């Protein structure tokens, strides 16, 4: 008995059928691995191995990660802008306090100067607007302080 060798047992070439199911989301980089989520930037499926977890969500490793980080950074910049406006309010309080000190000192100086000159006593009247201005700015400073008051200052005083 000689072995009957027929070339190729099964003549039919097995055709590769690629899975194109939409319902089952696979990782874009690792075929077969189930996706745990999709990239925030390119919406590709990411498995647990390659997904980079960011604050905003998942991202492709090294490809979309900088982009998503940039988006997060711009969001944080918007939040920082809001805190800047709060800081502006706080610095306005210092402005009013400084104006209070300057106006009161100038007013007192003008009044004392006018009173020291008997011939020009009317000069002391010029100090009154300064005193009024100092009083008003002191009130504004107090109001600003009440508005921008924040419990627990996070500013470290370490020089
Ligand atoms: Zn993967
Ligand atoms: Zn991506």
Image (cartoon, grey):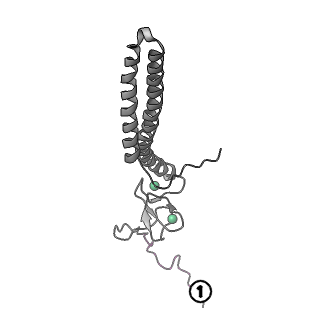
Identify the residue at horizontal 49%, vertical 57% (top origin).
Answer: 60
Across and down, in percent, residue 112 comes to 47, 20
Task: Pick the quarter of the image with the C terminus.
Answer: top right
Q: Please name the residue that numbered disc 1 is placed on.
A: 3
Q: Relative to 100, does residue 111 appear above or below in the rendering?
A: above
Q: What element carries label 1?
A: loop
The quarter of the image that holds ligand 2 is bottom left
Q: Relative to 54, does residue 14 appear above or below in the rendering?
A: below
Residue bounds of the magenta highlight: 1-15
Q: Relative to 112, does residue 141 appear above or below in the rendering?
A: below
Q: Does the segment drawn in magenta span residue 11? A: yes
Q: Does the segment drawn in magenta span residue 37? A: no
Depth order, front residue of 134/141: 134
Depth order, front residue of 111/30: 111
Across and down, in percent, residue 41 comes to 42, 53
Q: Relative to 100, does residue 65 appear above or below in the rendering?
A: below
Depth order, front residue of 62/116: 116
Depth order, front residue of 135/150: 135
Across and down, in percent, residue 126 comes to 38, 17
Label 1 Cα crowd, 10 Å radius (few <14 / some 14-19 / many 20+): few
Identify the residue at horizontal 44%, vertical 26% (top origin).
Answer: 103
Q: Which residue reaches farthest right?
A: 159
């Amino acid at each position: 008995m000689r072995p009957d060798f027929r070339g190729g047992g099964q003549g039919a070439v097995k055709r590769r059928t690629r899975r194109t199911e939409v319902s089952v989301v696979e990782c874009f980089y690792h075929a077969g691995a189930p996706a745990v989520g999709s990239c925030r930037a390119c919406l590709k499926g990411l498995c647990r191995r390659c997904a980079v977890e960011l604050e905003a969500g998942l991202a492709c490793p090294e490809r979309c990660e900088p982009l998503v980080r940039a988006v997060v950074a711009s969001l944080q910049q918007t939040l920082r802008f809001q805190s800047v406006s709060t800081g502006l309010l706080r610095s306005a309080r210092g402005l009013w306090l400084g104006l209070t000190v300057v106006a009161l000192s100038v007013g007192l100086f003008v009044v004392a100067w006018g009173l020291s000159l008997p011939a020009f006593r009317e000069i002391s009247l010029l100090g009154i607007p300064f005193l009024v201005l100092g009083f008003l700015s002191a009130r504004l400073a107090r109001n600003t302080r009440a508005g921008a008051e924040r419990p627990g200052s996070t500013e470290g005083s370490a020089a």
